[in-house]
Image: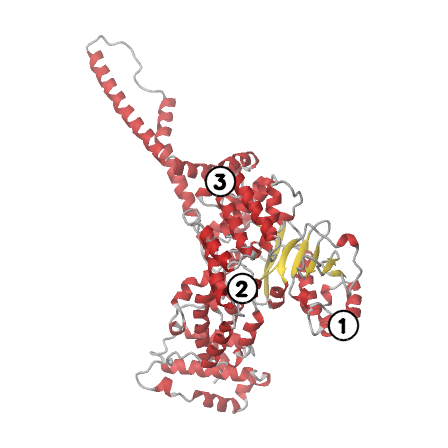
Amino acid sequence: MNPWKILEITPTSDKKMIKRAYAEKLKTMIPDEQPEEFQCLKTAFDLALTLSKNDSLIEDDLFTSIAATTEIAEEFSQPSDDYTHHGQSSFPAFQPLEGFSDQLQKIIDEENYFENVSVWKELLASIDSWSIDEYMQNTYTIQLFLVENYPCLAREIIRFLFQTFDLTELTDHIGQERFVSTHFLELKKVIYNVPPFSFQIAENIPANLRKKYFHLRYEIYQIIANKQSYITSIDDKIRNCAEIFAEDSELWNLQMIDLLDKTNGFLENEDALKQYKFLLNRTQTMNSSPTTIFLNRYFMLLTETQTDDAIFNWNKEQLTIPEELFLLILGCIFFKKSQYVPAFNLWKQLNISRKIALQEQFKVILPHLSKDQKVDYRLIEKEVRRVLEPKTEMTVSFKKGFMFLFCSLLVLLFMVQISSRPQTPRRIGRTPEELVKAYREKHSNQQKTEEIEAKEASDSELYGDSLEERFVHYFYASDDPKGKQLFIDRNVNDVQLKKLLSYYVDQDTHKYSDSSGFKFKSNTVSDPNSKKTAVYYKEELLCILESGAFTLTLENVYGNQWHLLSDIKFKQLLNTIEINPESSTTIFLKKFLFSDNKQENLLEYTDYLSENMKIILENKLNEPISDNLRKGFLYLVREPKLKFIVSDQNQENEEKLILTFDELGRLDHVFGPNWEEVDEEMIHYSNREAFKNIPTLLEEPD
């Protein structure tokens, strides 16, 4: 038996790949009806796991030479009673493994699972030694745990569990239903996309009240996100939370977000402005978070106490602001900075109630729009009129009908009257111009309705949340002409790029079937106005996407079959994605500053270091590192020159390192204690923006 051929994968020591291949093959059969095929598959799986533990046994040559493998296969192929007993299911009845369940329950009881990823890594340290039954059963246990506890878990932990157990690909296919929670499938997207709340305050809350507090906090977020705060006041729930613990900036952030929601982002109501300022001041003595900093910067913009452009440099992934509201606020930022076209492109994606509320702003924007954008503007106007004036239109139609009948009666009486009089030449018909005018009036309402319905039909949901996911889905992983055309209409403005993409609308673009094989590497910090993303399928580089930094607008595609560049220029563009200030900072933190293998890494990661930095690192390899920095936060400064700040978040006596870069994006200097001397003027940066939590960054896979 060759297990690799049965599983249809190349020989590998990657146990996760083996388990994924087994799960994929399992979807294609019904174990109860195909017991022999199922047993063969299971034997292949067990054999592959055994071989994966010894690299010397992995190669295909083994199966042409020695009988050792056969002996192993025979050992695994002995059918157990669970699978051969007449009348029993091919799957043993689900029995949660006491070892794993007990360990999980212990973590829950200790109330230390909200944000500490290392706790979960320790729990799953033995995953590679699990049998397929253990893996499936434990996967089911984790599903049930997530359904009950996801409001209490940091996003990093949830995504770690999704990745470890392949929960993104989980379905209720035949062969898996026994180990799949229907409730989990219903909530899977919600669970994966939980807001990035901080749970550092957990230790300050009584252990028996922590879950209640975090559930309440998440419930408040959901009320705002689902537009229920207009009919369900969050004030009572805020008070309930504050009675448990009132020193959480994330809680008061939600109340500020609710105020922005109810005032359509502009806080033009005086009472709302005062309340927002009061809440903002209240958070200054509490735990800092990217959302708090963003809300403070936004308030400064609204009150015109900030003039720099740092407010633009935020990623939605960092903030506990619902998606639709973030689009609104980002549009408000552009509007306040007189950048009207980006504001329009964001606001046209909002729901109709928002568009109605922003009518005055749309009028200001109109003169700055292109011809195509004015078409979108007119469609928005028609959509608004249809909602605001349905009764008026009915009244006008009724009046027109009544006037028509009344006039017809008058004409009839007039004709009867004049029939008894001598006839004289008289114009009783209408001119062609009058006929055209009447026709236009008659069909104008019908035309409006047809245009709006056509627009609504084209506004159906596109696949995926990000521009990159949409592009690879429509142009590499599916054959959906309507979807491709909708993507072009919605996400592309450049005329030449529209033509290039349109060529593939009717072509078969379904080249890759495994959506999990797509990977993206992006550079979002080097150019504040543009984002460059390298798209890979497994190890194959497919193309490079260039998009707007703040909008879902594709500006160019580089690579074979797309916009061709010379080999030198393409390599230079790729280098800016792979080696840039963000990637160099990540390498410095993970491979040097907080690594136990600094010397070995110095040989492997030299591409990310300038010549100056190589010398400095060689001399600083054994310098002590503060544990507070390891628990801190990474900040970005864009002006006057891009740099990153590693901070311990101590507001009274902050310890930090300041990282600067050369023109190639490589790390060039590290200023701070035990490193290079820092200039006094470099110590304070009022324009720094929150970028990433350092514990989260360190836990991310390479």
Quarter of the image that includes the C terminus: bottom right
Q: Which residue is mark 3?
A: 376
Question: Where in the figure is residue 20, as x and y percent of width and height?
Answer: 49, 73
Distance CA(mark 2)–CA(mark 1): 38 Å
Q: Which of the marked residues, 2 or 3, is nearer the chain's N terminus? A: 2
Whether residue 550 is visible = no
Residue at 37 percent across and 26 percent down: it is 436
Q: Which of the marked residues, 3 or 1, is nearer the chain's N terminus? A: 3
Residue at 66 percent across and 59 percent down: it is 649
Q: Secondary structure at mark 2?
A: loop
Q: Are marks 2 and 3 in contact (CB under 8 Å)?
A: no
Horizontally, residue 90 falls left or right of residue 584, namely left
Distance CA(mark 3)–CA(mark 1): 61 Å
Front disc: 3 or 1: 1
Q: Secondary structure at mark 3?
A: helix
Q: Is residue 511 above or below residue 138?
A: above
Q: Amino acid at mark 2?
A: Ile
Question: Where in the figure is residue 469, as x and y percent of width and height?
Answer: 52, 58
Question: Where in the figure is residue 2, as x and y percent of width and height?
Answer: 49, 83
Horizontally, residue 544 falls left or right of residue 671, namely left
Front disc: 2 or 3: 2
Specify the farthest residue to the top. 422
Question: Where in the figure is residue 555, as x and y percent of width and height?
Answer: 58, 49
Q: Amino acid at mark 3?
A: Asp
Distance CA(mark 2)–CA(mark 3): 51 Å
Q: Which of the marked residues, 2 or 1, is nearer the chain's N terminus? A: 2
Q: Which residue is mark 1?
A: 622
Q: Secondary structure at mark 1?
A: loop
Q: Amino acid at mark 1?
A: Asn
Q: Which residue is mark 2?
A: 205
